């Protein structure tokens, strides 16, 4: 059971939240009064279904170490979005979260230790990673804990912690700047639904509008389970002729494309992710137009990740490219492969651009917008 917080931090502004609430016929029990909601002047509380669901994962979160005041709403939402990425990987994986977006993510490449996977995720944008919530899909090692404590981190979440890791997280004599670190255990990440057809335990996405009205939606589940589900981009041009991408992704490119696609599920739309060898080189997020999202991601890759050349890198777009302008920009930067939903009226123009530049492009047949 999560650790209870001091009463002075129960809610902002002295507001109290009930022990149980009911939404759409489901009764929820309160686990924690949170430090605050999205902002310090907003009260908040953390609830889980009183009678399940059987697949509850985040609702079974345990606070192993906490700084002054415990968790905020944003801390929990960062964990939620991190797990939305990490659940797709069996090898060591890490997501570094900032304001509900990954500033970087990585998966084990070869036989890399977990600490190196963390460094790759952090250093995608080390400036944004300052004060982040860091999450893992495997138990945190002592070596990784040392690396985490070397910089300012607000929270760590993982399914477990190997011997010595928790002691390092509590060693404030050596790591004075991380006295407010929150350490969380989130069990059984593998139970979270991932693919179309997976059991969702009746869970729905619920958005509350300003007047109390609700939008209720099914959760996002992908149809893309493996590189074999990535189909070469093809369509018909204005003359009705079949047009296909002439370059197929190599096995290494397909691996990077799939990784970037999964990371993009929890990037605020419009989202563009650039990746290479199991790490993000840049995460472009929250843009209103596709070209701007591509330009932002490319600029971040050059300025923050230390990637240098982007030659051979993979790029994932959560929506289709309406025109060839984004492809021209990608080609100039050295992008070698692209994954995107397809479905534009001008897919033929985009495919022609890829063929001109020798870029491999695949369609997923699904969009993965996230408007959180």
Image (cartoon, rainbow, N blue to C red):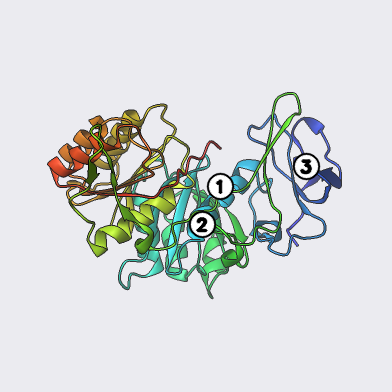
- Residue 68 location (% of width, % of height): 66, 47
Q: Residue 196 sits in which quadrant?
A: bottom right
Q: Which residue is mark 3?
A: 10
The C terminus: image quadrant: top right
Residue 112 vertical placement versus 364 (above, below)? below
Q: Residue 345 sits in which quadrant?
A: top left
- Rendered image: mark on residue 78: 1
Residue neighbourhood size for the residue with mark 1, other residues' Cα within 10 Å, grouped as few (<14), some (14–19), many (≥20): many
The single residue placed furthest to the top in the displayed view is 211
Q: Nearer the viewer, residue 262 or 47?
A: 262
Q: CA distance from mark 2 to mark 3?
A: 25 Å
The disc, 2 or 3, on the residue closer to the chain's N-terminal end is: 3
> Relative to residue 192, is residue 141 drawn left or right?
left
- Residue 58 location (% of width, % of height): 65, 57
Q: Nearer the viewer, mark 2 or mark 3?
A: 2
Q: Which residue is mark 2?
A: 135
Give the secondary structure at mark 3.
loop
- Residue 38 location (% of width, % of height): 63, 35
The N terminus: image quadrant: bottom right
Q: CA distance from mark 2 to mark 1?
A: 9 Å
- The residue positioned 25% from the left and 64% from the top of the image is 251
Give the secondary structure at mark 2.
strand
**Contact? badges 2 and 1 (CB < 8 Å):** yes
The disc, 3 or 1, on the residue closer to the chain's N-terminal end is: 3
- The residue positioned 78% from the left and 41% from the top of the image is 8
Residue neighbourhood size for the residue with mark 3, other residues' Cα within 10 Å, grouped as few (<14), some (14–19), many (≥20): many
């Amino acid at each position: 059971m999560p650790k209870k917080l001091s009463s002075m931090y129960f809610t902002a502004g002295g507001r109290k939240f009930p022990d149980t609430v009911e939404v759409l016929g489901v009764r929820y029990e309160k686990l924690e009064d949170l430090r605050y909601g999205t902002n310090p002047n907003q009260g908040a509380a953390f609830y889980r279904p009183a009678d399940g669901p059987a697949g509850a994962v985040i609702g079974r979160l345990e606070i192993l170490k906490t700084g002054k005041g415990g968790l905020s709403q944003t801390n929990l939402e960062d964990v939620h979005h991190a797990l939305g990425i990490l659940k797709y990987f069996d090898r060591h994986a890490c997501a570094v979260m900032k304001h509900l977006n990954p500033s970087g993510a990585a998966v084990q490449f070869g036989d890399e230790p977990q600490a190196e996977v963390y460094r790759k995720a952090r250093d995608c944008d080390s400036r944004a990673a300052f004060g982040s919530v860091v999450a893992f899909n495997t138990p945190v090692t002592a070596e990784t804990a040392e690396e985490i404590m070397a910089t300012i981190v607000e929270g760590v979440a993982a399914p477990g912690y190997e011997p010595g890791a928790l002691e390092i997280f509590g060693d404030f004599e050596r790591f004075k700047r991380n006295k407010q670190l929150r350490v969380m255990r989130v069990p059984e990440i593998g139970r979270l639904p991932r693919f179309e057809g997976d059991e969702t335990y009746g869970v729905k996405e619920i958005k509350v509008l300003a007047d109390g009205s609700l939008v209720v939606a099914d959760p996002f589940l992908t149809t893309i389970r493996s590189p074999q589900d990535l189909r070469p981009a093809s369509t018909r041009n204005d003359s009705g002729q079949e047009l296909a991408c002439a370059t197929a992704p190599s096995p290494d490119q397909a691996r990077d494309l799939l990784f970037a696609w999964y990371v993009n599920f929890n990037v605020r739309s419009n989202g563009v992710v650039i990746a290479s060898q199991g790490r993000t080189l840049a995460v472009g997020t929250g843009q209103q137009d596709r070209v701007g999202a591509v330009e932002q991601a490319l600029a971040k890759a050059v300025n923050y990740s230390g990637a240098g050349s982007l030659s051979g890198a993979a790029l994932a777009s959560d929506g289709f490219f309406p025109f060839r302008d984004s492809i021209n920009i990608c080609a100039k930067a050295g992008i070698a492969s692209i994954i995107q939903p397809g479905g534009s009226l001008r897919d033929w123009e985009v495919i022609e651009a890829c063929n001109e530049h020798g870029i491999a492009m695949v369609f997923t047949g699904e969009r993965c917008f996230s408007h959180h």
